[in-house]
Each structure stands twice: as structure tokens, then as C-alpha cells.
Image (cartoon, rainbow, N blue to C red):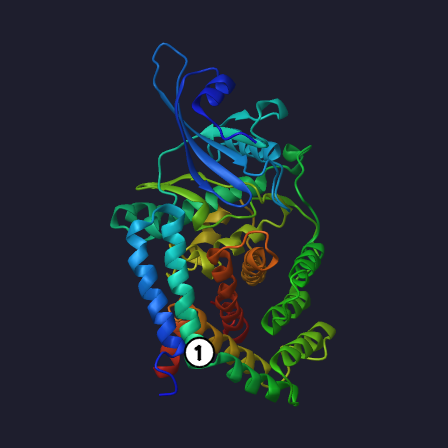
């Protein structure tokens, strides 16, 4: 697959393109900053982001990129803060699966906006803004995503899938098995009732000094229980050390739940939200196993993947704290 | 001293080398050099603290038998999957919390939950 060039993108977009620069690239995806120029008389700058699959394919379990772009556009049209999609790549575009969207100004590195004094007003506003986004997303009718390849399934099926995923790595973690048993005992089997972002956490927010600019990375969106997004947002891994602010390192749970209810998200079942927080913590632990397995299996051998496998012990400690003290 | 150059000395020497190299690196390689130094710090702590000995002792008590650590872990996991042991098993939660603390002390002693628990113990 070709590396995108300004000429290539200019041809795709039909406007001049002055710069294409790779921002990040992993095993599965690559992100490029694209500086285009509006084709109208103003000739004003048109900053864009190109996101495409590095190997030309989507990672396992992720939404096909065309569907991710469509869902992002549905969210945009529903008034949610997301980057507007301007072009979905097709098979003849020569860049694999991907799409081009608006590049919005803001800080994406959570440790920066969580800690820098400039972002104090943003941190104060974020709990309410996150609640409003989730309330609006979870209220969208399932039919609005008809035709998209969103994974679905009941909560019991989800738990069984997560256990099968854990067992793929051949690692025996008594803490993970205890957490699975704990969840099986408590999680009620419920059908999917909402469109869930699936990765709604501090690391996926674009933040300006006055608040939330956009919610990024819709790749793990699926149909499920809206409480999943509320629980995942509160997992300790996304607090970046600011553990006494359970909502992403910036807010309190009660404020989040109240704002979610006030914004029309429906009543929050506190117990269920807590179960999803335990579930999310376990899910992050299994993701660490998976990243470590990238190195062990030879799929992507490097020191970063090997080291992240050792983060399993952080998750084991969080799970034991949750099980012993009832909260984290 | 058994050796002039102990394993920990070699680790320190390689850490020093990586620190020398770092200013010459950029982007992904500079980041990986930092991760590599951190990985060596984990190895040094693991050699000093022997968390697997702690875990073996704790799991031996939970399982009521002597075995090597892999078999103790596998046996406990099998019991948990079969429901033969669970959250109500006496001593299990405290033992697994202590194992998790011993492992996190090696892997990331700066982790918030680790520091929180350590502060609660000394308070």
C-alpha cells in the first residue's frame, strides 16, 4: 500500500494539499495530518486528518473504517462533538480502508490537559460535557445505525466473549479468574439497548482550555448497555494517577450520573455502573495481556509491547482493591 | 561479594548506556529507550524482591499443598472456574491482594493504587 503523498490526497480531495505528515502509526492504524486549502475563492487553510489502516486492514474486533466513518457522521449530525468526516476512502483510492476528517484544534494528550493550569476551566466543565455526550449518544435509536457492522450481543454473551479472549493467551491469572467469577455472579443478562462508544475515556478526548472539543476513536463502538460507557470512563487506568477523581481523573461519579440523568440519558443504576467499572478494569487487563502477546507471539516484537504486559499487575491490584474494599 | 560484577551491576551499566544514547534518539526510538530503561528497573526490582517466592508462599497456603508456582496458579484458576473456590473462600481475597501488591511493587511502585495501599498500611 502506498504511503500517502500531497499529490495523492490533492487528487482525492480535488483541492490543493501542501503537507502530509504521519502523526502516529501502530500495528494496525496510521494517522496523518493533512494541510489542504479550500477550493473556494478564499483559499483558506483546510486542516484535515487522514486515518487509515497501516496494513490495509482493520484490527480484530474493530469496526470496519467505512462504518466507523459513517457512525462518526451520524454522531456529528446528531449534534455530538466529533470531527466531521469529509471523505471515506474507497477501494480504488489506493490507501486501504480509511477516511479523512476535519482536524480540530485541541489537546489530545490527557496527562497534559489533566494537569496543566491552562485547562482548569476545561476540567471543571468536562464531567457535565461527558454526561451530555453520553446521554445524547445512548438516546439515539438503534435503527439510526442500521446497516453498520456494529457488534451486538447480550451482557452474558459479552462476558463469555471476554473470557474466551482471556483464555487465548494461555496465561493463568487467579485475580482475573476471581474477577470473572465475581462478575458472573452479579451481571444480569440484558439485551443490547443503546449505541455505545466502547472506548469513552480521557485518552480519547480532544480538549481545549474551555472544555471538550471532540470525542475521538469510534472504532470500538457497538450495541450494548449505556452503563458500559459510564463504567469505562471511571476505570483507574484513565485517571492518570489522579485516583481521587474517579471520572477520568477530573470528576466525581455522582456529578456524572446526575448530569447524565439531567441530560435525558435515563436513570443510572449505581450498582450496574459499578459492575461495568469492574468489567472495564478486567477488560483493560486483558488488553494488556493482548499487547504483551504481540511481543511474545512475534506479531510485533518490541520493548514497548513487552513492557506493557507487565501492566497486568496494576490491573490485578485495582481488581483486588475493588473486590476487597468495594470501590476504587 | 560473589562476583565483581553482579547481575544488578550489569543492569545499571546498561541503563547508563541507554541514558547516554537517549539524546541522540528521537520519536519512537527515544520513547522506546525510556521504556527499555524502565524495563531494566523492573528486572532489578524483581531480582531484589523475589515476588514469585512471596506468591508461592501465599498460594501454597490457599491451596494447602506444595507445588511450583505455575501449577499452584493453574490449580487455583481451575478451582475458580469450576466454582470450587470463590470470593467467600477464607483468606483468598487477602492472599490475592498481597500477591498483587508484591507484583506491583516490582512492576510499578509508583502506581496510584499501590501507593494508596502502602499509605493505608503505614497510617
Residue found at the far left of this picture: A117
Q: Quadrant of the C terminus of chain B?
A: bottom left
Counting from the top left corner in percent of width and height, residue A234 is at 48, 57
Counting from the top left corner in percent of width and height, residue A13 is at 49, 19
Q: Disc 1 sits on a residue from what chain?
A: B
Image point 65% across, 40% down: which residue? A150
Image point 54% across, 50% down: which residue? A229
Q: Which of the pair A245/A150 is nearer the observer?
A: A150
Residue found at the far top of this picture: A41
Image point 57% across, 61% down: which residue? A289
Taking B42 as reference, is A59 left or right? right
| Residue identified by numbered label 1 | B47
Image point 57% across, 84% down: which residue? B56
Q: Which of the pair A104/A2 is nearer the observer?
A: A2
Taking A33 as reference, is A169 left or right? right
Residue A200 vertical position relative to residue A174 in the rendered view, above or below = above
Amino acid at each position: 500500500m502506498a504511503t500517502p503523498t500531497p499529490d495523492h490526497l490533492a487528487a482525492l480531495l480535488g483541492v490543493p494539499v501542501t503537507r502530509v505528515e504521519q502523526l502516529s502509526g501502530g500495528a494496525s492504524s496510521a494517522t496523518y495530518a493533512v494541510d489542504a486549502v479550500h477550493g473556494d475563492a478564499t483559499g483558506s487553510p483546510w486542516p484535515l486528518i487522514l486515518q487509515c489502516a497501516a496494513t490495509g486492514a482493520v484490527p480484530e474486533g474493530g469496526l470496519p473504517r467505512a462504518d466507523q466513518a459513517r457512525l462518526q457522521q451520524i454522531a456529528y449530525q446528531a449534534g455530538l462533538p466529533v470531527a466531521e468526516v469529509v471523505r471515506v476512502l474507497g477501494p480504488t483510492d489506493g490507501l486501504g480502508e480509511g477516511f479523512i476528517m476535519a482536524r480540530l484544534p485541541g489537546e489530545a494528550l490527557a496527562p497534559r490537559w489533566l494537569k496543566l493550569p491552562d485547562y482548569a476551566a476545561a476540567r471543571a466543565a468536562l464531567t457535565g460535557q461527558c454526561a451530555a455526550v453520553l446521554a445524547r449518544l445512548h438516546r439515539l435509536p438503534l435503527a439510526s445505525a442500521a446497516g453498520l457492522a456494529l457488534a451486538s450481543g447480550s451482557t452474558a454473551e459479552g462476558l463469555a466473549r471476554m473470557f474466551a479472549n482471556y483464555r487465548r493467551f494461555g496465561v493463568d491469572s487467579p485475580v482475573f479468574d476471581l474477577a470473572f467469577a465475581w462478575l458472573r455472579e452479579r451481571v444480569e443478562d440484558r439485551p443490547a439497548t443503546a449505541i455505545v462508544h466502547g472506548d469513552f475515556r480521557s485518552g480519547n478526548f480532544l480538549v481545549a482550555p474551555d472544555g471538550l472539543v471532540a470525542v475521538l476513536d469510534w472504532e470500538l463502538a457497538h450495541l450494548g448497555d449505556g452503563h458500559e460507557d459510564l463504567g469505562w470512563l471511571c476505570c483507574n487506568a484513565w485517571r492518570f494517577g489522579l485516583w481521587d477523581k474517579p471520572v477520568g481523573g477530573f470528576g466525581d461519579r455522582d456529578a456524572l450520573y446526575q448530569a447524565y440523568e439531567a441530560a435525558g440519558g435515563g436513570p443510572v443504576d449505581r450498582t450496574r455502573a459499578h459492575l461495568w467499572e469492574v468489567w472495564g478494569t478486567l477488560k483493560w487487563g486483558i488488553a494488556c495481556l493482548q499487547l504483551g502477546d504481540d511481543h511474545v507471539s512475534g506479531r510485533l516484537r518490541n520493548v514497548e509491547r513487552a513492557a506493557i504486559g507487565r501492566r497486568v499487575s496494576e490491573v490485578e491490584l485495582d481488581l483486588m482493591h475493588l473486590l476487597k474494599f468495594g470501590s476504587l | 561479594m560473589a562476583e565483581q560484577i553482579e547481575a544488578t551491576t550489569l543492569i545499571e551499566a546498561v541503563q547508563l548506556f541507554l541514558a547516554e544514547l537517549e539524546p541522540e534518539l528521537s520519536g519512537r526510538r527515544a520513547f522506546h529507550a525510556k521504556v527499555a530503561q524502565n524495563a531494566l528497573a523492573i528486572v532489578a526490582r524483581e531480582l531484589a524482591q523475589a515476588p514469585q517466592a512471596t506468591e508461592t508462599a501465599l498460594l501454597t497456603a490457599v491451596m494447602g499443598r506444595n507445588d511450583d508456582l505455575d501449577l499452584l496458579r493453574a490449580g487455583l484458576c481451575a478451582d475458580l472456574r469450576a466454582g470450587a473456590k470463590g470470593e467467600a473462600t477464607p483468606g483468598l481475597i487477602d492472599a490475592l491482594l498481597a500477591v498483587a501488591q508484591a507484583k506491583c511493587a516490582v512492576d510499578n511502585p509508583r502506581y496510584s493504587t499501590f501507593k494508596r495501599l502502602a499509605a493505608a498500611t503505614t497510617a
